[in-house]
Amino acid sequence: MLTQKDISLSPESILLADGGTITIRPIHPDDADDLQNTFMRLSTQSIYLRFLSYKKALTDEEALRLATVDYNTQMAFVATMIENGHEIVVGVSRYALLDKVHPKTAESAVIVGDEFQGRGIGKLLLWKLVNYAKAKGFDHLRGNLDMGNTRMLDLIKRSGLPHHQRYVDGIWEVNIEISGSGK
Ligand SMILES: CC(C)(COP(=O)(O)OP(=O)(O)OC[C@H]1O[C@@H](n2cnc3c(N)ncnc32)[C@H](O)[C@@H]1OP(=O)(O)O)[C@@H](O)C(=O)NCCC(=O)NCCS
C-alpha cells in the first residue's frame, strides 16, 4: 500500500493481489501516443464515465495536452504494464488546479482500461494522486461523476476519505477532503 509520504516521482513497481505487476509513474509528453492507444481500447461506457461525453478518439492535440503537466498545479500518474514486450498504459489518475479563486482545490479524474478494471489499479492510482496532491498543498479533490457511476462512488466511499457529494446539473459533484488523509 502506498504511504502518506509516497510523493516520489520515481517509477514504483507494485505487485497486485492477483499476481500481476504494474508500474505507477508520473506521466510525460512521450506518453501521448500510448494515451491514444489506450483510449482506443476503452469501452464506450468507460469513455462516457470519464469524460461525461462520447468521443471516438483522442486527437493528437488532446493526447499531448493530457500527457503534458507541470507536476504542480497539474499532475497525472500512469499505471503501466508490459504487454507483448512493450510498456502499455492501463490507467491514469490526474488532477488540475480548478481555478485561482480556489487554490487548494483540484479537479480530478481516474480511469482504468476495461480489461484491467477490478484488480485494484484504480484504488492505487487514486491514493497516489491523493498523497501527491496533499504534499502539493491541496486540501480537496473534486470530481464530476455520472449519477450512475456507483463504482467510482464506492471506491471513494471505501477509501475512507471524508467526502461530500451534491447533485449539480444532473451529475454528482464529489468533493474529497484530503488534508487529513494518511494511507
Ligand atoms: C472507477 C474505476 C476508475 C475503478 O478502477 P478499478 O481499477 O476497476 O478499481 P479497483 O479495482 O481499484 O477497485 C476498487 C474497489 O472496487 C471494488 N471493485 C472492483 N471491481 C468491482 C466490480 N466490478 N463491482 C463492484 N466492485 C468492484 C474492488 O474490490 C475495490 O474494493 P476495495 O476498495 O474494497 O478493495 C474504473 O472502473 C474506471 O475507469 N471506470 C470508468 C471511468 C470512470 O468512471 N472514472 C471515474 C470518473 S472520472
Image (spheres, grey):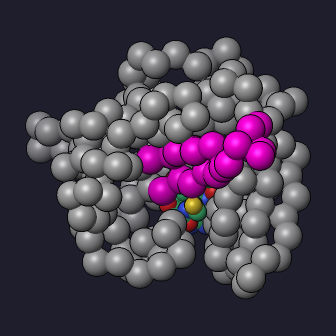
Which quadrant, please, contains the N terminus?
top right
Which quadrant, please, contains the C terminus?
top right
Q: Which residues are magenta?
A: 92-111
Point out the quarter of the image occupied by ligand 1.
bottom right
**Taking 69 as reference, is 50 left or right?**
right
Q: Above or below — where is 143 with respect to 43?
A: above
In this orientation, which residue lies closer to the viewer: 165 or 96?
96
Q: Is residue 99 magenta?
A: yes
Q: Above or below — where is 172 with respect to 94?
A: below
> Would residue 39 be seen by someone viewing this image from the given angle?
yes
**Taking 77 as reference, is 179 left or right?**
right
Residue name at image x 70 percent, y 43 percent: 100
> Would residue 159 be seen by someone viewing this image from the given angle?
no
Q: Is residue 170 magenta?
A: no
x and y, in percent, of residue 43 in the image: 37, 75
Residue name at image x 27 percent, y 37 percent: 29
x and y, in percent, of residue 50 in the image: 51, 66
Magenta residues: mostly which secondary structure?
strand
x and y, in percent, of residue 125 in the image: 54, 41
Q: Above or below — where is 16 with respect to 2?
A: below
**Taking 181 as reference, is 149 left or right?**
left
Q: Residue furthest left?
A: 85
The image quarter in which residue 22 lies: top left
Residue name at image x 82 percent, y 76 percent: 167
x and y, in percent, of residue 46 in the image: 45, 71
**Taking 54 as reference, is 85 left or right?**
left
- How many marks on residues? 0
